[in-house]
């Protein structure tokens, strides 16, 4: 139940607070006073999208706040608990709308999101304004209304879940069949690639080793000349370094007889000579390994070319080529099992399709039963709303599946969707002798308003929402019809909190609480205010609604009589 509503800097409202109670609350006032603005504020607090254009001129932010009393064990209480809120504290929703679009939502004092707000308020209140009339004209809403009335939402959700469970399996089957259809060509490609890589007998790091070998082979003669000349200079030629070092050693030995310190230098010279002799031996060994072999160079370059081509085709490195070979082997193994996978998927789909069809057909049967019950109730309600002898029916039809529809999304040739097999259309004939036509073809706003009210009254019997707001329920009606509508709203308020925005005194007189919304100009600014009406002021407001600006004794007497008959 809505207890408190506060609006600041919103449209033409500066600062406005309203306290609500159970029963029927009437909001009245002259056209343009701001009644619809209040309804817009409630819609925003229930999760509608906000816009900076709603902020009052001269302000940077608008602030809306509503306090709801939450019934324990209700759906709203359960959802609040799931999000970590305590429903015993009530539900306090606060929205701040900024010109910078940095809008904020607070739930029970905690910063929240529009998604969480929508999930909590979805079953909190029902707003029946102009959009409700338009919604009732949309055939896609008729099936939902029927399911809500019949308590079929849990079964509808099972159908929905089954539909979204079967879709991925259908997609998987189509993919497997497509793979199988192109299997032969694909296998040939994979096997060619596998053979090409396998026959190359690649070793990790082989390309680096080959590049080194090619460099040596291409420069073999230069290497031979350099090493051979070094051996000659160090050891083999006349006057070589070793020979000259020997002479230096002898000279130092002679001098060592004079100074023993030079004998030690002579010994070091001997060590240097032995080291050069060892180095010369190593160079001779290296000389034997040097190849000047054009055929071997050609073979190495051919191998390098093979590896370059493989790297270019399969990933840029030998490691990538080897990884591709591994993936080919896995894919070939998977393809070998493709027929088995298709069979398993078809078996799973067959089972799930059977479940889907059973659920959809069960839902369809219950809808047909519910449609007759709802239609009979609507006729009775419309009769009580001065639309006697109106015929109302709900057409339930299936959509034939076309040739391109997957068989798992059909049942007996009809299309299966996330809502089942059915399309529902509300048909009405308000006047005797007329054929039944879709509700959207109703020309009279007064008739449509009463159909909306009848639907709301019927759904209220099964609806979990505690607060119902009516705007424009009086569109196109007046006189005795308005009186009947007022009685119906009063009756509905016995089970729900009802808030009604109206221009008609015949409806307003039934209110348990009455507020007047007025507009004034102060300091060059338009302001909207709201005032609860006591007995005297309510009498004057009813008189104003009856007679306009000039309130005469006659209109006051008429208003008093109206209020007395409503008690």
Image (cartoon, helix red, strand yellow):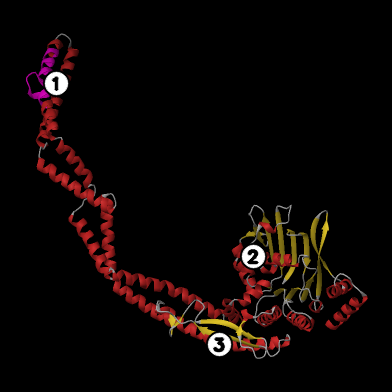
Which numbered disc flags the more N-terminal residue, 3 or 2?
A: 2
The boundaries of the magenta stretch are 231-252
User: Can I make out residue 125 in this image?
Assistant: no
Residue under label 2, please give it: 48
221 on left or right of 543? left
Is residue 7 shown in magenta? no
| The N terminus sits in image quarter | bottom right
Q: Which of the 4 quarters of the picture holds residue 192?
A: bottom left
Asked if disc 3 and disc 2 are in contact, CB closer than 8 Å, the reply is: no
Q: Of tags 1 and 3, which is closer to the observer?
A: 3
Residue 238 location in percent, x, y? 6, 19
On the rendered image, what quadrant is the C terminus found in?
Answer: bottom right
Say which mark, if any, is on residue 368: 3
Residue at point 17%, 40% (across, down): 214
Which percent across, then down, holds residue 259? 17, 10
* Label 2, label 1: how far apart the Cα atoms are: 101 Å
- Distance of mark 1 from mark 3, alpha carbons? 117 Å
Q: Which mark is residue 270?
A: 1
């Amino acid at each position: 139940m809505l207890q408190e509503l506060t609006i600041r800097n919103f449209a033409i409202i500066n600062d406005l607070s309203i306290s609500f109670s159970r029963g029927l609350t009437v909001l009245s006032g002259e056209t343009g006073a701001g009644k619809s603005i209040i309804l817009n504020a409630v819609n925003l607090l229930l999760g509608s999208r906000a816009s900076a254009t709603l902020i009052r001129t001269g302000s940077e932010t608008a602030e809306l706040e509503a306090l709801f009393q939450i019934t324990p064990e209700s759906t709203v209480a359960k959802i609040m608990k799931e999000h970590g809120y305590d429903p015993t504290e009530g539900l306090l929703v606060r929205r701040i709308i900024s010109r910078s679009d940095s809008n904020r939502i607070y739930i029970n004092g905690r910063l929240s999101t529009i998604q969480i707000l929508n999930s909590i308020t979805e079953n909190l209140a029902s707003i029946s304004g102009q959009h409700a009339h338009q919604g009732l004209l949309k055939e896609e809403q008729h099936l939902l209304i029927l399911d809500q009335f019949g308590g079929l939402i849990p079964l509808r959700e099972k159908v929905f879940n089954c539909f979204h469970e079967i879709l991925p399996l259908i997609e998987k089957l189509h993919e497997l069949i497509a793979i199988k259809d192109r299997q032969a060509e694909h296998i040939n490609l994979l096997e060619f690639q596998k053979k090409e890589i396998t026959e190359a007998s690649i070793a990790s790091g082989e390309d680096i080793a080959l590049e080194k070998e090619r460099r040596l082979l291409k420069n073999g003669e230069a290497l031979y000349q350099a090493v051979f000349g070094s051996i000659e200079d160090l050891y083999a030629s006349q006057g070589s370094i070793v020979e000259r070092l020997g002479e230096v050693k002898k000279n130092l030995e002679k001098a060592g007889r004079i100074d023993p310190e030079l004998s030690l230098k002579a010994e070091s010279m001997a060590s240097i000579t032995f080291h050069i002799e060892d180095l010369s031996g190593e160079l001779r060994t290296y000389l034997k390994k040097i190849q000047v072999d054009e055929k071997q160079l050609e073979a190495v370059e051919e191998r390098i070319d093979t590896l370059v081509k493989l790297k270019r085709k399969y990933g840029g490195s030998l490691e990538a080529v080897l990884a591709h070979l591994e993936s080919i082997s896995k894919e070939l193994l998977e393809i070998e099992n493709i027929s088995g996978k298709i069979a398993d998927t078809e078996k799973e789909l067959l089972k799930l399709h059977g479940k889907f069809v059973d659920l959809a057909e069960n839902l369809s049967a219950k809808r047909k039963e519910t449609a007759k019950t709802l239609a009979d109730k609507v006729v009775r309600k419309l009769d009580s709303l001065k639309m006697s002898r109106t015929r109302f029916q709900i057409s339930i039809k299936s959509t034939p599946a076309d040739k391109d529809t997957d068989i798992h999304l059909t049942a007996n040739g009809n299309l299966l969707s996330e809502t089942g097999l059915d399309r529902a259309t509300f048909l009405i004939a308000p006047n005797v002798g007329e054929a039944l036509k879709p509700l959207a073809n109703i020309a009279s706003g007064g008739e449509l308003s009463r159909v909306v009210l009848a639907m709301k009254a019927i759904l209220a019997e099964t609806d979990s929402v505690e607060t119902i707001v009516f705007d424009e329920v009086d569109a196109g009606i007046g006189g005795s019809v308005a009186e009947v509508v007022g009685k119906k709203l009063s009756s509905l308020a016995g089970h729900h909190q009802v808030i009604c925005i109206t221009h008609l005194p015949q409806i307003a007189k039934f209110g348990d609480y009455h507020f007047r919304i007025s507009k004034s100009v102060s300091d060059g600014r338009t302001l909207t205010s709201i005032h609860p009406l006591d007995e005297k002021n309510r009498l004057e407001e009813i008189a104003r609604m009856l007679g306009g600006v000039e309130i005469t004794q006659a209109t006051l007497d008429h208003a008093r009589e109206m209020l007395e008959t409503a008690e």
